[in-house]
Image (cartoon, rainbow, N blue to C red):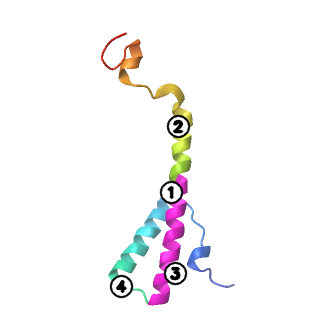
């Protein structure tokens, strides 16, 4: 069975993607990787960043749906605006 290249490896969760991204950055910054491996790491890192950004956007949309009308300025609770006027 052929070994998967870094860009073919699935991401299980946001947290795992962030951990893998941190490890890639650390290895690249340390200069541990030869040129070809650095290029592959950069490509994988780009994929991980896109995945994480998409996950954050998805969760942000879910939070907005769940909160609905709950997000109001504090003064609106009693029918007052921010200056305390009705």
Q: Quadrant of residue 11?
A: bottom right
User: As drawn, which residue projects farthest toward the right?
Assistant: 1
Helix, strand or loop at label 2? It is helix
Give the spatial CA distance, label 4 vs label 3.
14 Å
Helix, strand or loop at label 4? It is loop
**What's the magenta region?**
35-55
Give the spatial CA distance, label 1 vs label 4.
26 Å
Give the spatial CA distance, label 2 vs label 4.
42 Å
Helix, strand or loop at label 3? It is helix
Residue 43's x, y, as percent?
A: 52, 75
Residue at the image point whose x is 53% and y is 62% from the top = 50
User: As drawn, which residue projects farthest toward the top?
Assistant: 86
Give the spatial CA distance, label 3 vs label 2.
36 Å
The verdict on residue 45 being magenta is: yes
Tell me, yes or no, whether the two marked residues, 3 and 1, touch with CB atoms within 8 Å.
Answer: no
Residue 57 against residue 24 in the figure, above or below: above
* Mark 3 burial class by Cα count in 10 Å: few <14, some 14-19, many 20+: some
Q: Disc 3 marks which residue? A: 40
Q: Disc 2 marks which residue? A: 64
Q: Quadrant of residue 28?
A: bottom left
Q: Disc 4 marks which residue? A: 31
Q: Earlier in the sequence, mark 2 or mark 1?
A: 1
Residue at the image point whose x is 33% and y is 20% from the top = 82
Give the spatial CA distance, label 3 vs label 1.
20 Å
Q: Disc 1 marks which residue? A: 53
Tell me, yes or no, whether the two marked residues, 2 and 1, touch with CB atoms within 8 Å.
Answer: no
Q: Nearer the viewer, residue 83 or 1?
A: 83
Q: Which mark is residue 5?
A: none
Q: Nearer the viewer, residue 40 or 22?
A: 40
Q: Earlier in the sequence, mark 1 or mark 4?
A: 4
Q: Earlier in the sequence, mark 4 or mark 3?
A: 4
Tell me, yes or no, whether the two marked residues, 3 and 2, touch with CB atoms within 8 Å.
Answer: no
């Amino acid at each position: 069975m052929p070994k998967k290249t870094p860009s073919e490896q699935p991401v299980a969760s946001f947290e795992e993607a962030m951990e893998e991204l941190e490890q890639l950055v650390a290895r690249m910054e340390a200069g541990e990787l030869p040129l070809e491996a650095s290029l592959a790491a950069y490509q994988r890192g780009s994929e991980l960043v896109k995945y994480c950004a998409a996950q954050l956007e998805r969760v942000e949309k879910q939070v907005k749906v769940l909160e609905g009308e709950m997000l109001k300025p504090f003064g609106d609770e009693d029918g007052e605006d921010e200056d305390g006027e009705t």
